[in-house]
Amino acid sequence: MSPLGWSVAAVAAVGLAVGRLLGWTEVAALGASAGAVFVLSVAMTFGRARYAVTLDLAARRVTVGERAVGRLVVTNAARRRSLPSRLELPVGRSVGELAVPSLASRGRHDELFAVPTDRRAVVVVGPVRSWRGDPLGVARRTVRWTEPLELYVHPRVVSLGAAGAGLLRDLEGQTARDLSDTDLSFHALRDYVAGDDRRYIHWRTTARRGTLMVKQFEDTRRTLTAIALADAPADYAGDDDLELAVSVTASLGVQAIRDQREVTVVAGPGRMRVASPPLLLDDCAAFVTGSAGAGVHLLGRRVGREAPNASLAVLVTGSVPDERDLRLAAQHVPAGARTLVVRCVPGAPLRARTRGVLTLATLGALEDLPRLLRRAVLP
């Protein structure tokens, strides 16, 4: 029942009651008329078509700008010919109406439709609904025919190619500053002490010096790349900033996954899924900023909390933070990790400045990301 329907019902009840108590014929007639409209409107909601409805999408995952097409098949499951009707198909925040003609028994009607993919998003398509009601909108009965489907519109990504070599990558591990008695990276020799493993005695030096000498090693660790994306609206001057930052994050994460490197992507309230590129891109498609989101000044802390063993930390933000904010964010990255802070400013020329293990970069186009990695991440 619509608000108009409840209003008509109230007018009918009040008009009939007042007209009868006061003997006011005009008011009673108004109430009777409203009551007739109400009853007739409710009666028009009875009955239903017997349809078998199939909703399908050609692809559940597309990239921004790619064509996304769906298909709606309506079959008359009744033994008699159906009357013409209209179906509603919600697509995101919009609702489309589809006209279904009269169908013979087991007759089918196919309808193709396109889904806009001009912006990164998770678009909910459906559920398909039909409705019966009066022309005035007093009463309406809705029947749901299908379950909703999700269409993931992924952000644009760029292949890093040979630039991926600029990211920390290794087969045996990246050496750390911790020393141990057993590992892969030889460091030095030292005097033998009781309890040392005799397999690591260096016999040539022992014979030359006349005392037992053992090998000492540097601990190694697998490369861990941590990528953190700012999700505070104040970090972005507009949608273009945000889309570029999400594309940078997605490109770096997808390349790390394809190279079979360990990676952690921090964005929003938790981590994004990195089991496969499609899952990461799904989470990137659903990413939105929020009032309680973390700005760039908190990204370093998040990396320290979520990936304390990171060997490379990439912090990605919009155009609003200045250089002081970027340096402040990098201060809280785990010690020893190489840090790249990317400030996304659409249309700006590529700039990168490296001092020690910290690189501050300004990126104006996604296509410049491979060049940035070749120039700035590693000497």
Image (spheres, helix red, strand yellow):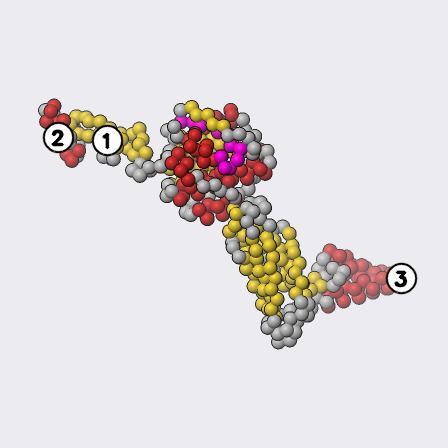
For marks 2 and 3, give the CA distance: 118 Å
Q: Characterize the local packing of mark 2: few (<14), some (14-19) or many (20 or more) Cα atoms within 10 angstroms.
A: some
**Earlier residue among tags 1 and 2:** 1
Q: Quadrant of residue 175?
A: top left
Marker disc for residue 85 = none
Q: Characterize the local packing of mark 3: few (<14), some (14-19) or many (20 or more) Cα atoms within 10 angstroms.
A: few
Question: Disc 2 marks which residue?
Answer: 203
In the image, the segment drawn in magenta is 357-368
Q: Residue at x 43, y 29 (%)?
A: 376
**Earlier residue among tags 2 and 3:** 3
Single out the mark in the foreground, 1 or 3: 1
Image quadrant occupied by the N terminus: bottom right
Question: Disc 3 marks which residue?
Answer: 26
Amino acid bearing label 2: Trp
Q: Quadrant of residue 34?
A: bottom right
Label 1: element kind: strand
Q: Residue at x 55, y 30 (%)?
A: 348
Query: Are the residues tagged 1 and 3 within 8 Å (C-beta)?
Result: no
Marker disc for residue 186 = 1
Amino acid bearing label 1: Phe
Q: Residue at x 60, y 59 (%)?
A: 112
For marks 1 and 2, give the CA distance: 15 Å
Measuring from the top left, give residue 203's x and y in whole percent. 12, 30
